[in-house]
Structures are given as structure tokens and as C-alpha cells.
Image: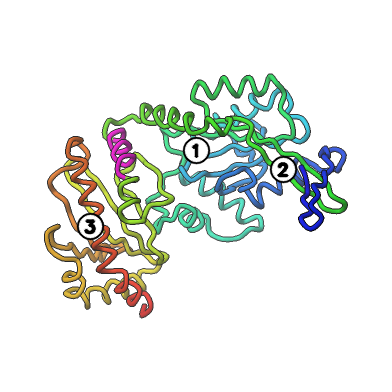
Amino acid sequence: MFLIDVQNKKAVSLEKQSFAELKLSERYDLQEWIAGNPSILGEDLLIIQKEFDGFLNTNERLDLLALDKDRKLVVIENKLDDSGKDVVWQSLKYASYCAALKTDEICKIYQDYLDLGVGGAAPERIAEFYGEQDYGDIRLNPAGGDQRIILAAASFRKEVTSTVLWLREHGVDITCIKVTPYKDDARLYLDVEQILPIQDIGDYQIRLAEKKQEDAFSSKEEARRYRFWKKALPILREATGLFDNVSPTKDNWLAARVGHKGISFNVAIRIDSARTEIYIDLGDKGRNDAVYSELVARKAEAERAFGEGLGDLDWQEHPDKRMRKICVHYRHYGSADEKHWDEVIGFFADSLLRFMGAFEQLLSDAIAKS
């Protein structure tokens, strides 16, 4: 690694160090750096526990446990100057232990972590991480999703990299991250490089993983929905500018955040129908009522701006629930009518654009008054 002196047009070589030379530890240094800033590992992760030992009938503990944006559990094992020969076996055991964890159990694990000093309520933080209004709609560690493994070390033994390559060929999502410390006088730098999978072939491996994920879905309907969203998302992004950080899913709905916390524009598909909706849940029933009432007061204006041709707006107050909805329904085709998917996607794009045009200012006004 080089430090560039722009003024003097020089590249100054930084001194590569070992963790041992720097008297740094796996648990109290590298682990804390990753826990404090998980983007070190190259992606957006939510750390939910450190030194987790809550496995049944064993005293073993993993270094870090996290959630990724696909709602999968991620086992993170940190080593320092040498990965050791048993790190893969160790991490596979931990991943197998995590496979049975349910959403509420994961939330409890995260709450225990927050209670140690970070603070906050786990359901709210999880919902915020996924851009959702209601934690109750979130399903973590999906049955067909498998668990992931990330190994971080300054060097990896050949037996480790060989095993990782074989596991990846057989569908195990395991990544090797090389972390190298450098020193410049009193300053310490950390160089981070993903060595497996090789990033140049990452897209191909991702496609293979998606194919295996689709094949693993237990329900034909879930597999159909996954294919539908994979086809629909690029078209909807291009048409509306929404769903930038949304991935295909086996669920029957997708949510797009639209600039107001607690408000999303959702699209949902059923076997024989579809709908687009404005979903209102600001976290407080009173505020939801106030926003919804303000929109209802301007109902004629909203419906006039929304226009004709897609059907009437369905104003859903849901007095027994906290959230409120405004929907438009498409009752012609759904996920089962694959040859008509383009028509369903066209309905989604058209209705989303109409909702944006008709309600964006109304929502801003209503939220400001609530």
C-alpha cells in the first residue's frame, strides 16, 4: 500500500504489519472494528450479537452474528494473522446451529445485544434496517434462504481456500475477506480485500445462487412470485425511479420508500389479481388517523388527480389496526398467468406513477399537519 504525496509527486510505501507485531487482538480489536463498522466487509450488515453462545447443548460461541439485506443470518468469524486450518469447519457448525432460529428468537438475540449498551428496541431497529413500517411483516432467516458465512483474516491457508471453493461450488455462501494492517508513524490503516469469491466472476456466481435459491423454494407459487419480481423490478425501476434497494423475493409484495418515514408505495401480486397501494404507518395510531383523515378530506382532489381507466381507489381505514391503506386493484391476471405478466407489470408502473403524481404533495401536507 502506498501513501500518495500529491504536492511532491511521490508514492510513499507504507509499512505492512502483522496483528501480532501491533499487539492487536482478534476479540478486542478486529472484532470491535467490524462490529462498529460492518461495511468493512464490503456490504450493509446489521450486527445483532457478539460472542454469541446461545446454542443448545454446546458452549461454543461465534465471533459476530449479523443480518444481511436479504434477511439471511450471517456468521462472521475473525482470525488474525493466520486463518488456522479449522476455521471452515468451525463456521459451518455455527451456521448449522443458526439454521433453526426463528424471527422472534433472532429479535431477542438482537435485543440482548442492544441492552448491553448500544440501546434501542430491536423490532424498530430491524424494521428500519429493512425500510419497513411494521416489524410484524418481516420474516428473518427464511427457510429456503440458507445462512451465510464470512471469514476475515490476514492470510488464508491453502486447505481453507480449497475447501471454501468446493463449498461454494456446492451452494454454500461463504466469503473470504483478507484484512491487512499498515502503519504510518502513529497512524494505523486497514486494507480489506475480498479474495473469495473472486469479484470479477461474482455476477456469474450470484446468478447461479439465485437459480439454486429459486429451485429450493418449497412452493411453486413462491417460485413463480420470485420469477415475477425478478422480471418486474428492472422495469419498475426504469419507469418510476423506485425500488432501487429492493431485491426479488418469494413474498407476494414489495415496498418502495418515498421520502416520508412510515409511508411506502407497495405493489402486491396474488394468484389471480394484483394491487398497488399507499401504506401509512408512522408508528403511532393517532398520527396515522390524522394523516389518513387529512387525505380523506381531500379525497375528491386526489381521485381527480389519479385519473380514470385503472379503477376506483379503495380507501381502507382498518379501524382494528394501526395502519391505513389506499389501494387500486387489478382483477384480471395474477402470478399464475405468466403469459400476462407484462400487463400486470404495466398496471404496476402506471398506478405507481399516478399515486406519485396525485399523492406526493397531499402526503407532505398531511404529515406536516399531523
Q: Is residue 321 left or right of residue 73?
A: left
Q: Point out the stretch of residues depicted in magenta.
A: 222-232
Task: Please report whichever mark, 3 or 2, sits nearer to the chain's N-terminal start.
Answer: 2
Residue located 30% across and 44% down the image: 232
Quadrant holding the C terminus = bottom left
Q: Position of residue 45 (x, y in %)?
A: 56, 47
Q: Position of residue 60 (x, y in %)?
A: 67, 33
Q: CA distance from mark 3 to mark 1?
A: 38 Å
Q: Position of residue 221 (x, y in %)?
A: 26, 34
Confirm whether the magenta stretch covers residue 226: yes
Residue located 71% across and 39% down the image: 179
Counting other residues with Cα less than 10 Å from the Cα at mark 2, is it few (<14), some (14-19), or many (20 or more)? few
Q: Nearer the viewer, mark 1 or mark 2?
A: 2
Confirm whether the magenta stretch covers residue 43: no
- Give the number of the disc on residue 191: 2
Q: Which element is circle 3 on?
A: helix
Residue located 43% across and 50% down the image: 245
Q: Which element is circle 1 on?
A: loop
Figure quadrant of residue 341: top left
Residue beneath disc 3: 351
